[in-house]
Image (cartoon, helix red, strand yellow):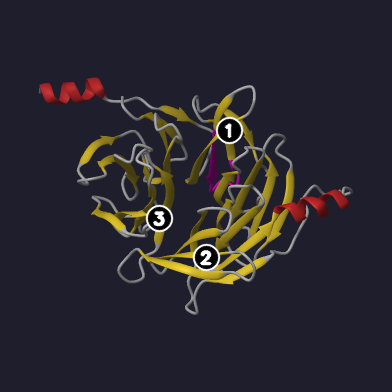
Amino acid sequence: DSRTMAAAATRQIPIVCPGHTRPLAELQFCAVDDEEEQRTFLVSACHDKMPMLRDGVSGDWIGTFKGHKGAVWSSKLDPSGYLAATASGDFSVKVWDAITGKNLYSFQHKHICKTIDFSPNSKLLATGGHEGLLRIYDLLSCQQVAAAQQNDEKGDGVSMEPKLVLTQSEEKIYITKCLWIDNEMVLVASSDGKIRVWNVVGAGSLSYTFEVADGAVEVRDMEIRAIDDGRTMLIVAAGDKVSLFDLNSKALVSSFKMPIHFREEGGASLHPSGSKFIAGGSDLWVRVFDTLSGTELDCLKGHHGPIRCLRYAPDGKTFATGSEDGTIRIWKTDA
């Protein structure tokens, strides 16, 4: 019938990025302004132990960070694009030279590492995982130690102790995601449905807790996005809901029940305009929703496995999705 034909005519064919051999775990875009050019990079964490760096526009492969012995759950570039960090099931976090791929530092943990994030000034690295401890590493002092130990033969990177370790809860919980708000405050999402805001100056202190989910529903994903009206928003995927908080007022702006759930995988990302968001999880489809009403605007089909992670590009013109099928797809926002 004519509707099916119209849908087929407008069906979007995304850029497919091959290379990974196992389910994806996390995607992050990074826009880098250097003197010569502005470039956007896309970094991907994957269960195949081989986090990859790509051109964020074309999807072309740039390099692979080789050295982890277990699944990589998180991979990030620092804001300058010179450093990369990865968190793995091999109980370690590694920091890499993003230009050469050399492993600079290795931080041993006592359990699976699920998440890392660079502070906006690139001086600190936050890590979290199954121990339920937020660790803060001072990358400047790592740099000094590395300079003193230039005879590192094995190339495993310099090892350092964290400058701060913060226990999230007396209960046994684990950390799913951590994100810096600024150079002093870190958001820490956990398996108990809470997002704790830590001030990491000095001995560290808990400054606020967002109650995201009813009961112990694991927070699967969160993203901070400065939107066009001047607000800074926090979008959260947990259980079967996507919630939006205003980070400045700390108010819950909206919460929408999804046609999918995030109990095993998935996430959500807010468009820079603030007007729509994408979500994916327990099925093969990527859906676009209106932020005000929660109405489904679009449904994109192409992956052959559940959606594990997804992010809008910084300019909002495209978004990337990673699936259990081992591929990354880059879609146009307004195709």
SS at circle 1 = strand
- Determine the residue positioned at 63% across, 61% down: 136
Q: Is residue 88 left or right of residue 245?
A: right
Q: Which residues are magenta?
A: 41-51
Q: Which residue is mark 1?
A: 32
Q: Quadrant of residue 304?
A: top left
Q: Quadrant of the C terminus?
A: top left
Q: Is residue 65 left or right of residue 55?
A: right
The picture places residue 310, in percent across and down from the top left corner, at: 41, 42
SS at circle 2 = strand
The mark total stands at: 3
Gap in Å between the C-alphas at discs 2 and 3? Answer: 15 Å
Q: Earlier in the sequence, mark 3 or mark 1?
A: 1
Q: Vertically, is 322 above or below 214?
A: above
Other residues around mark 1 within 10 Å, as few (<14) / some (14–19) / many (≥20): some
Can the viewer see residue 285 in this picture?
Answer: no
Disc number placed over residue 248 in the picture, else none: 3
Gap in Å between the C-alphas at discs 3 and 1? Answer: 26 Å
The picture places residue 130, in percent across and down from the top left corner, at: 54, 66
Mark 2 touches mark 1? (CB < 8 Å): no
Q: Which residue is mark 2?
A: 198
Other residues around mark 2 within 10 Å, as few (<14) / some (14–19) / many (≥20): many
Disc number placed over residue 258 in the picture, else none: none
Q: Earlier in the sequence, mark 2 or mark 1?
A: 1
The picture places residue 173, in percent across and down from the top left corner, at: 48, 71
- Determine the residue positioned at 49% across, 26% down: 57
Gap in Å between the C-alphas at discs 2 and 1? Answer: 27 Å
Q: Quadrant of the N terminus?
A: top left
